[in-house]
Image: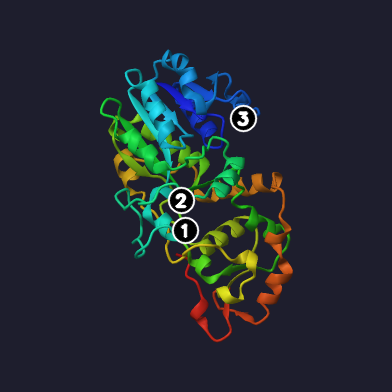
Amino acid sequence: MSVILLIGGSGFIGTQIARALVEGGHEVSVFVRGTTRGSTATLSAGVREIHGDRHRLQESAATLRALKPDVVIDCVLSSGRQARALMSTFRGTASRIVAVSSCDVYRACGVLHGSEPGPLEPIPLTESSPLRTRLQIYPAARIRVMQQVFGWLDEEYDKIPVEREVLGDPDLPGTVLRLPMVYGPGDPQHRLFPIVKRVDDGRPFMMFEEKHAAWRSPRGYVENVAAAIVLAALSDRAAGRIYNVGEAESLSELAWARRVSGVAGWNGQLVTVPADRAPAHVLRPGNLDQHWATDTTRVRQELGYAEPIAAEDAIGRTVEWTRAHPPPIDARAFDYTAEDEARSDIRPTPSGDAAERGGPRNRVPDR
């Protein structure tokens, strides 16, 4: 049995980590804000809750150090400043820090967003792929929007300084897990909603701009992602290591929509259109020639990771939750009249997708 402290244990991913640790027979404490909206209620029999403010960690340092945790898992590290405070708090007390990071540290992210000049990054992205050279790429206005969903973000949000602090301490070993786009019941971003709503609205087709349809990115189901984090936390081999986490294959947006809509019971057509004919709400910003596909071989080979929840079950559970918990609807994102007009001169291809009149040049492969 290990003594584990989980910082940010009441959130979307943190609750799943805590549950898996308790089920594994470990002693688990979670450091959370005073209001958890009941998210840890199902864990109350096996989890100790410590209330405090992640932004002022030093105020709770004595209480946290008294736990003498073997491992500290921090799900809500936002900046280098927070990471320095974390390492200072637990140096000499904990045996290891596990930091939840993001695939947005890669230079490929900066290329997509236009902050990194130069050529495209080759894919798949491995743990050794170049990182961004520019820090804090999200403008202040975007950070404020993100903080409405993720209250733990601070104004200095960037996972690159976080990783440097956690991996660079000579006295306190660290492990970093770079997460994908995480979906599942409780997802605060409702990632499946745009697909599920169109299915439930009875739309005969779904429309994608060509480059967005082909764009590939990593994804992971929340329980599977939590399982990878737990595995890394409990494995001494993970000390000093970085792991990409996510499904073995980074699907294109089109292939992902086909998979999700199929599980949701839809058999309509997937339509692609060039950018100059796509409705405004279908367009996505950035250099979509830069894909984010990641390689998760390391975590699988070194730690023996395999997803405990199969893809079909994961998607099915998320579709069911999405239908029961729809977010507020922005009607502009579902302008079906504009989509119908844009499709008026597009014919289906034999694959069941659709291409611009004139041939198959606009067909998008699944991968």
Which callout, 2 or 1, points at the residue further toward the start of the chain? 1
User: Taking 344 as reference, is 165 left or right?
Assistant: left
* Image quadrant in which the C terminus is located: bottom left
Q: Is residue 2 visible?
A: no
Residue 129 appears in the rendering: yes
Q: Which residue is mark 1?
A: 113
Hey, what amino acid is under mark 1? Answer: His
Q: Nearer the viewer, residue 263 or 245?
A: 245
Give 317 or 107, whichever is nearer the viewer: 107
Q: Which tag, 1 or 3, sits closer to the chain's start?
A: 3
Crowd around label 2: few <14 · some 14–19 · many ≥20 (10 Å):
some
Residue placed under numbered mark 3 in the picture: 39
| Residue 106 placement (x, y as % from top left) | 38, 51
Quadrant containing the N terminus is top left
Residue at image mark 2: 137
Front position among marks 1 and 3:
1
Q: Residue extending furthest left?
A: 170
Query: Residue 71: horizontal and vertical position, in percent?
Result: 38, 25
User: The residue under label 3 is which amino acid type?
Assistant: Ser
Q: Residue furthest bottom?
A: 358
Corner quadrant of residue 147? top right
Callout 2 secondary element: loop
Residue furthest to the front in view is 140
Counting from the top left corner in percent of width and height, residue 14 is at 52, 33
Foreground of the two, 224 or 60:
60
Residue 188 image offset from top left, x and y in percent = 61, 43
Asked whether the residues under the numbered discs 2 and 1 touch, taking CB atoms below 8 Å apart as contact, a structural biologist would say yes
Left or right: 161 as drawn, with respect to 15: left
Labels 3 and 2: the sequence-earlier one: 3
Residue 50 against residue 237 in the figure, above or below: above
